[in-house]
Image (cartoon, rainbow, N blue to C red):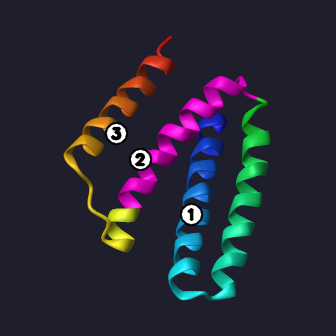
Amino acid sequence: MKFYLILLALALLDLAGLISAKFWYLKYNPLYMAASILSFALAAIAICLSLKFQGVAIVNIIWMALSTTLVTIAGYYFFKEPIALYQFVGIFIILVGLVIVQWK
């Protein structure tokens, strides 16, 4: 359970870093850049902690799947970025892949 909480924190920190970077790009406020750097630094710590529980491949697969899904949803809600049908299909395939990878 601790592994999944760390991975969730990792995905959320990655999301926070990307959202902050996008806001920095749009508004050129240095606080957004600082928030982005801090979020990515904390995400690096979460990666290191997660490797205590699983191998690199599994950590990376789960992190990328969660991150891709969360970033797509956040882009839609925060920045009004459209989500195409093929993106929905891709996210569905990613989530199915996550289930298969974690199947024991």
Main SS of residues in magenta: helix
Work out how far the residue at label 1 is from the one at label 3, CA to CA, in angstroms.
18 Å
Tell me the residue at 33%/29% (across/down): 93
SS at circle 2: helix
Work out how far the residue at label 1 is from the one at label 2, CA to CA, in angstroms.
13 Å
Residue 86 percent across, percent down from the top left:
24, 41
- Name which of mark 1 and mark 3 comes first in the sequence: 1
Circles 3 and 2: CB distance less than 8 Å?
Answer: yes
Reply above or below: 66 against 42. Answer: above
* Residue 69: mark: 2
Q: Residue furthest left?
A: 85
Numbered range of the magenta stretch:
53-74
Residue neighbourhood size for the residue with mark 2, other residues' Cα within 10 Å, grouped as few (<14), some (14–19), many (≥20): many
Residue 36, by quadrant, is bottom right
Q: Which residue is mark 3?
A: 91
Reply above or below: 34 against 91. Answer: below
SS at circle 3: helix
Circles 1 and 3: CB distance less than 8 Å?
Answer: no
Q: Amino acid at mark 3?
A: Ile
Residue neighbourhood size for the residue with mark 3, other residues' Cα within 10 Å, grouped as few (<14), some (14–19), many (≥20): some
Q: Which residue is mark 1?
A: 18
**Residue 2 horizontal side relative to residue 78, left or right:** right
Residue 12 percent across, percent down from the top left:
56, 56
